[in-house]
Image: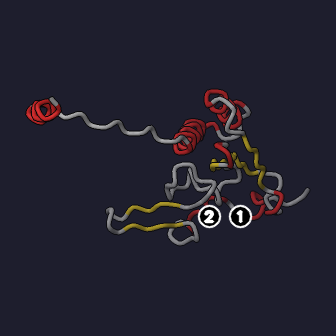
Amino acid sequence: MAPTTSNLVSPDLVWEIARGNNSFLVKRKESGGVQLSRDPMNLLNKNSRKYAGFVNPKAIGVQPAEKGGVKITSKKESAALKPAQASVEVTHSGGQSTKKLYKTVAGKTAKTGYRPDLREAAVARVSAVRKSQKDPKPTPETKPRGNKAKKAAATES
């Protein structure tokens, strides 16, 4: 039998060792001591065991791709000892409807039994990425009201 990470070290042990000091950790003293994470496999950017991608044998990451697309990265549990082969990236184009993309991500996380607890967070992350890729609407000019409108109308006539 080939060794896997579950045979070598428990993810709980890895988390206990690395939770207070790892390369993805961002500590903010100004905001009441909040600890955030820059892990690309962390959907909520929280420094917690549930969302830490470097600890969990199964993790999902969502990043923006070119031309309005979304790149979904997942870890293969079977290739845990081969870091170059451990992740699978699937890129969805920007032309794909958002509703279809939500359904795809939900199916990837929950329906196949991969990580059903991350379904809601993954769909929310896809939504945030798609929203950030849209061009903002131009702000309309403000129309004068009240006394300013009366003065403007009097100067025009």
Of residue 17 and residue 29, the one placed in the foreground of this image is: 29
Residue 65 versus residue 146 in the image, above or below: below
Quadrant holding the C terminus? top left
Label 2: few (<14), some or many (≥20) within 10 Å? few
The reply to whether the C-beta atoms of the residues labelled 2 and 1 are less than 8 Å apart is yes
Quadrant into which the N terminus falls: bottom right
Q: Which mark is residue 13?
A: 2
Identity of the residue drawn at 62% across and 27% down: 99
Identify the residue under disc 1. Answer: 9
Amino acid type at image mark 1: Val
* In-image side of 105 versus 135 (left or right): right
Label 2 is placed on what type of residue?
Leu
Indicate the secondary structure of the residue bearing disc 1: loop
Q: Residues within 10 Å of mark 1 (few under 14, many from 20)?
A: few
Which residue is rendered at x = 55% and y = 61% of the image? 38
Where residue 109 sits: x, y (%)?
67, 37
Q: Residue at x 83, y 62 (%)?
A: 82
Q: CA distance from mark 2 to mark 1?
A: 7 Å
Q: Position of residue 75 (x, y in %)?
A: 74, 51
Q: Is residue 138 above or below residue 7?
A: above
